[in-house]
Amino acid sequence: MNLIPNTFGTSLGKKYIMAITGLAMFGFVIAHLAGNLQIFLGPESINRYGHFLQTNPELIWPARIVLLLMLVLHVWAAIKLSAENKAARPVGYAAYQPVGSSYASRTMLMSGIIIFVFIIYHLLHFTVQSQYINLTGKNFATFVDPQKRHDIFQMMVVGFSNIWVSGFYILGMALLCLHLSHGVSSMFQSIGWKNKAYGPVLDKLARVVAMLIFIGYTSIPLAILLGYGKDRLS
């Protein structure tokens, strides 16, 4: 009966919301990386993957709606918790000396807001395929491979060939992984699965996973800037 008020109206409930939504989005980050890395298998693999997603709206649209809901709830809970923490300590310290906290943990809210802006740009760039923001002057929606499928390979190669786009993408992924390096660990703490015995292990594991994700995602624009895929474009 009181589940919803207790979840949305208490600090503990909001921490659970952040943990659950964070876990869902973390799973998406991993799955999305696995799909994107297929570009290194060549045009056929990444285009087949993209065609599967585009021709199954009954799968992709519910997933998009759930992810959007998770993102909104995650941002809402983060802002509310930050406001509650500030309200509990209305008078700031004369000289703030952060003790026992990492840079990632102290910038979670700010990095989260910047990541939100990055996600919007990324969606406009490769999902909506807005020609006005891709900085190439080309319409990605017109890219078609020999099998008459949307040419995801060509879109990614052309899109990431612009150094400013790739630079912003790399910056966005750096902030995302900085966010994850603390968020993954704090997620276990929020649901009570972290203690002094293996807490340090979870902290190190979170940083390693975040670094691997960063390497995986940024390997794509870096490889393209270095010439990968340009010889396969028609």
Image (cartoon, helix red, strand yellow):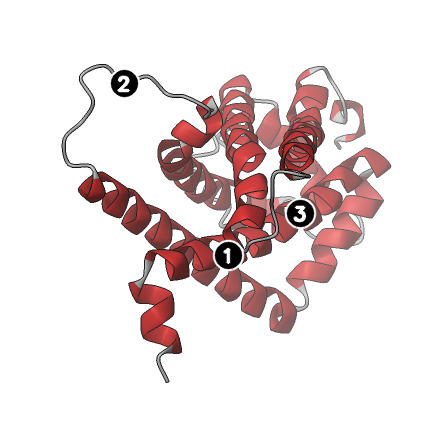
Mark 2 belongs to which amino acid? Tyr
Q: Establish if 63 lies above or below 204.
A: below
- Helix, strand or loop at label 2? It is loop
Q: Quadrant of the C terminus?
A: top right
Viewer-nearest residue: 6 or 60: 6
Labels 3 and 1: the sequence-earlier one: 1
Residue positioned 22% across, 39% down in the render: 86
Residue sitting farthest toward the left: 91
Side of 111 relative to 129 (left or right): left
Label 1 near label 2: C-beta < 8 Å? no
Label 2 or label 3, whichever lies nearer to me, is: 2
Residue 63: image location, x then y, percent: 58, 64
Label 3 or label 1, whichever lies nearer to me, is: 1
Mark 1 belongs to which amino acid? Thr
> What residue sits right under mark 2 in the picture?
96
Q: Establish if 152 lies above or below 137.
A: below
- How far apart are the alpha carbons under marks 2 and 3? 39 Å
Question: Dot 2, how many residues are within 10 Å of its Cα: few (below 14), some (14-19), or many (20+)?
Answer: few
Q: Can I make out residue 58 in this image?
A: yes
Viewer-nearest residue: 144 or 46: 46
Residue 229: image location, x then y, percent: 76, 27
Residue 41: image location, x then y, percent: 85, 38
> What residue sits right under mark 3 in the picture?
32
Label 3 near label 2: C-beta < 8 Å? no
Residue sitting farthest toward the front: 197
Q: Establish if 165 lies above or below 42.
A: above
Labels 2 and 1: the sequence-earlier one: 1
- How far apart are the alpha carbons under marks 2 and 1? 31 Å
> What residue sits right under mark 1 in the picture?
21
Mark 3 belongs to which amino acid? His
Label 2 or label 1, whichever lies nearer to me, is: 2
Residue positioned 58% across, 42% down in the render: 184
